[in-house]
Image: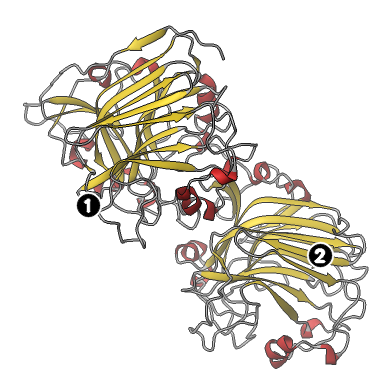
Amino acid sequence: MNFKTSRLIFCLNVSVISVILLLSGCVERKAQKSSEHLEEMAMGTSANEVIPFFQHWNLILGDGSNVGQATNYEHEDFFYTVKDDEKDWVVFKTPNAGNTHGTSNNTRTELAQLKKWSPMTDAKMNATLKVMNVATTGDARVPATYSVVVGQIHSADGHENEPLKIFYKKFPGHTKGSVFWNYEINTAGDDNSKRWDYSHPIWGYDFSVVGTDKNSYPTEPKDGIALGEAFSYEVKIKEGVMHLKFTSEGHETKTFTKNLVLSEYADRQDFPEQVERLFVPIGQDGVERKNAYTEEGLFFKLGCYNQTNGKDPKVNKVWCSGAETHDGNIEKQYADGNYAEVWFESASIEVSGDAISNAGYFQANDGLSKKTVYPHEVIPFMDKFKILTGDGTHVDDLTKYGHKDFFYTVIDGTRRWVVYKTPNSGVTSKNSSNTRTELQEKREWTPEQGGNLTGTCKVMQVSVSGDARVAASYSTVVGQIHSGEGHENEPLKIFYKKFPGHKKGSVFWNYEINTAGDDNSKRWDFSTAVWGNDMSDVGPSKDEFPPEPNDGIELGEEFSYEVNVYEGIMYLTFKSEGHRTKTFTKNLISSEYGNSADLPEQVKKLFVPIGQDGTERHNAYSGELNYFKQGAYNQTNGKSPETNMVWCAGAETYGGDIAKQYENGCYTEVWFRAATIGPGIPPK
């Protein structure tokens, strides 16, 4: 990209325009009611009269819409002018939850520049502003909570990352908040999910200072900025270097520089300690391109980009705040402080005369959050599967198929996932007591022919009700091999199980015998622990739980598995960041359990007391057609434990009302971001 050195300079001084409502009976705007700081509305004064530069930006609102250039434009919920301290201000306001722009989790009322420019040319943005409100709810352990971004540099190309975000953040009960700026790496390679920010304090703390639990806060910063206290920033780009200057009356002026075309973070050993502590534990540990943002078009953004959202922190412990959203009702969010509001007194930009159109960015991102992204667009092997969902619906063609209650896609702040969700009670298959939203492979194969299935997932929810004495309670199956012949038993089930009140759960896999003879009622499972405990770890009474596993997996913690069946042998591999990789083998064509003397002690403890004490065919599953299954197969059901103390969990089902089960945590939810299927491969 070539740019001339000539610049178009737009100097934006505030014109003092005041229109005071003196006539009784005039209707006040909603915004006037929602802000105690607002003294008078500058009725009739457009934002462009206060800061005359709106022809150079598109305005994105808190409902996700791009309204284009905001000359002579206002919106009573998001964008308008006010008069305060004899000055006119432009108000940018947005709730914790609304419709977002692009792939973001966060709402914004924000300007986005219509042109993009090279980091090797000159560009400049100035602003004077004051933050009037940040969200009053959220999880204090999440760094993004209670914060708003008031200025950015954004890339229009590549990963569309952000070399600059200027934040304001204030914890509830504090008078003063912090101002800091973040640099987001331009991640090397095609996988941008491993990107991270490095945060620099200006006044107060940096991004990484958080509370010790959900509702406890760090000490108030001594040199912070109060709500309603004005400050200014200057962002200047020259020859690939970003120069930052921050000023506020009564505070020390702060300056910073950052090279945008030569990375400091191209090697793993270069990671700052802050990043090691904040981002690496959640798997965001990428390295940066050596030339950083070289050759990418950049553009300024300015306004109110609310960083506090309603997403569950177990989705992403850095970006998902779990704040109050009133189900997206904007009026209710504004009424109880669950929004961000920023007032700008002045602003200006200077850019190269050779800056070029940024239309491609808007074309790619406008309306994206409202577009349906189907599961097959995230995991493209869906053509090889059919599905059964938690309400009993069977679908054979998964191309462009999704269901808002059971099978859909989400973004967790870094990447897209396919969600499988199902209640404790719904409609299930003919031979099962358990609901599922689960894929079933269309191809069938014998163990001798083999097959391979991989999955990278995280379990977001297991039922919070059940009977702790029942082995299947509080668990879900995330992957299977199922027989399509004979007794139709299951040579593999991969489980996740977590007791209420525990932080960590267990991952284990079960082998179900292919019972000898015609009577399959005596079948049983043998369970093998991967991380944590096996299936036989149960509570001493209905509401008493065993000790939490030391090496377990948390809800929201990612793990992966590979199931490789080759020439009759099943090879299993389990991996998770921060946990030891585990491998197992199991012969599927020659049984270990052909005689009564072969029953394992675990089976004698768990299954024999309920009369499930069968033996297996000596050739196990040899010659039987099998298929893979993947998704969320909820093992917690509402059946009475007296019926079966292994499989009948006695959980809450609200009479089968799915909405009530979801509302009260009586369901299972599993997210997959990657999965593959294919033929068995020779083991390494």
Earlier along the polypeptide chain: callout 2 or callout 1?
A: 1
The amino acid on which the numbered mark 2 sits, given as a three-letter code, is Tyr
Q: Secondary structure at mark 1?
A: loop
261 horizontally vs 571: left or right: left
Q: Secondary structure at mark 2?
A: strand
Q: Position of residue 17 (x, y in %)?
A: 15, 18
Residue 476 visible to the viewer: yes
Q: Nearer the viewer, residue 131 or 500?
A: 131
Q: Position of residue 173 (x, y in %)?
A: 22, 54
Looking at the image, the residue that sits furthest to the front is: 269
Above or below, 433 against 436 in this view is: below
Q: Position of residue 613 (x, y in %)?
A: 78, 89
Q: How many marks?
A: 2
Q: Nearer the viewer, residue 670 or 168?
A: 168
Query: Real-space Cα distance between discs 2 and 1?
Result: 56 Å
Quadrant for the N terminus, please: top right
Q: Which residue is mark 1?
A: 174
492 horizontally vs 244: left or right: right
Above or below, 659 against 526 in this view is: above
Label 2 with label 1: CB-CB less than 8 Å: no
Q: Residues within 10 Å of mark 2 (few under 14, many from 20)?
A: many
Q: Which residue is mark 2?
A: 571
Above or below, 232 against 283 in this view is: above
Residue 62 visible to the viewer: no
601 horizontally vs 515: left or right: left
Above or below, 134 against 630 in this view is: above
Look at 25% across and 32% down and name the residue there: 253
Look at 30% across and 47% down and name the residue there: 135
Quadrant for the C terminus, please: bottom right
Look at 61% across and 82% down and name the residue there: 537
Q: How is the image coloured?
A: secondary structure
The amino acid on which the numbered mark 1 sits, given as a three-letter code, is His
